[in-house]
Amino acid sequence: MGKDHQGLRTVERYYEDYGFRARELKREGKKIIGYLTAMTPLEIISAAGFVPLRIKGNVDEPITKADTKMETIVCPFVRNVFDSALKGRYDFLDGMVIPHTCDSLGRTYDIWSYNIKLPYFHFINIPHVTDEPSLEFLKEVLRTFIKTLERFGGKEISSEDLAKSIKAYNRNREMMRRLYELRKPDPPLISGIEMTKVLVASMGLPVDESTELIKSVIDEVSEREIESSDRSPRIMIVGDQIDDISLIEIIEKRGARMVMDDISIGSKVYWPDVPVTEDPLDGIAIRYLRMMKLPTLYKSSSTYEETLEERFGHIRQFIKDYKVDGAILFIYKYCDPYGFEVPALKSYIESVGIPVLYLEDEYSTSTLGRLKTRIEAFLEMIE
């Protein structure tokens, strides 16, 4: 008889009541800093003694309040999250950090800070090119960020604090990559629905608690036996912050297996570690500017083919390692960075022999019904 594991049960609680643990920590006297996007340097927030919490919206709830204060051409994800904040979902936050990753965030920062009254608000001016001057610029931006956190927390952030935080986050990423390894068998030991819940639960926890939770899930699902079954299509999903299981349910209830992702709460944040450098800030800057595989970071090689390989080569490797049969690009409407990348990305994936389904939709379950037929037809095509 296996052990009485609690990992997935804990994940379920944190997924269903997102922010539950942060609210507990708030009552214990901890300061909670909300943040948006994968470009926020969590190592610095944690080194300051604060608990970072990645902000998500509510895909089951219509946008009402946000559309009275923000243009409707702003991407639906940003509007939905802003709507949730206006409705008090994150009233336990002590502060918020917004990096400049796209116009929908960069051009709405003032709207956020004016309407969401918090003791601390900070905008991180992330550059979009990765050359040497940009790296130096980012390090200065991060030094300013550190100073604001020091003033807010009343505590100096030392190099030792940063190094310790980097080590904790690199360990967290290593543990999550170990969990991803359990998606390689056929069938995988952890479903796409379960994995999505783990990713969401983890982004709402302090780093050490997240690492322990991931480890407990690994211990639990590793005891599962790989059952022989009819060969099912193995699917990879590509997109930004897909933080709800509704889309994954459509895919897996049709009999396919969600075995890999290239999304901003998944492999995009858990693959690149912070390199160990003499000055910890150098390593943080290098990771976030040069190692993240995000469409907002411009990387150019001498030829177009080399540029494609630089931007999307990791996806080709994922397809090989996870034996992917088909890819689904799920892009939010009005998301210019991801939208502009679709033609090149779609043709690149198809060039390695993998069929692609491109979907553009809202950050809402209300519109998924119209996509269900297209997804089912795609899966039937590759069976």
Image (cartoon, rainbow, N blue to C red):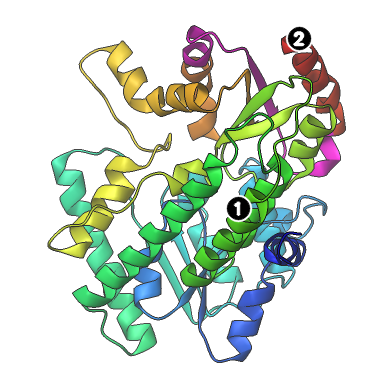
Name the residue at 80% across, 13% down: 380
User: Residue at left 56%, top 40%?
Assistant: 240
Which residue in the protein does label 2 denote?
381
Q: Secondary structure beneath disc 1?
A: helix
| Residue 142 or residue 287, whichever sits in front | 287
Q: Position of residue 184 (x, y in %)?
A: 57, 33
In the displayed structure, would residue 355 be above or below residue 214?
A: above
Q: CB atoms at circles 2 and 1 under 8 Å apart?
A: no
Query: Which amino acid, mark 2?
Result: Met
User: Is residue 375 visible to us here?
Assistant: yes
Q: Specify whether residue 196 is painted magenta.
A: no
Where on the picture, by quarter, is residue 14? bottom right
Residue 69 seen by the camera: no
Within 10 Å of disc 1 (Cα), the crowding (few <14, some 14-19, many 20+) is many
Residue furthest front as drawn: 1
Q: Is residue 142 left or right of residue 224?
A: left
Residue highlighted by disc 1: 199
Determine whether the residue tagged by mark 2 lies in a helix, strand or loop.
helix
User: In the image, is residue 21 above or below residue 302?
Assistant: below
Toward the viewer: 305 or 325?
A: 325
| Residue type, label 1 | Leu
- Left or right of 214 in this view: 282: left
Picture layout, residue 11 above or below residue 292: below
Which label is found at residue 299? none
In the rendered image, residue 349 lying in the magenta stretch gets the answer yes
Q: Give x and y (percent) for residue 47.
A: 34, 75
Quarter holding the C terminus?
top right
Tell me where the magenta segment starts and ends, as one range. Answer: 347-368
Q: Residues within 10 Å of mark 2 (few under 14, many from 20)?
A: few
The residue at the point 74 percent across, 67 percent down is 4
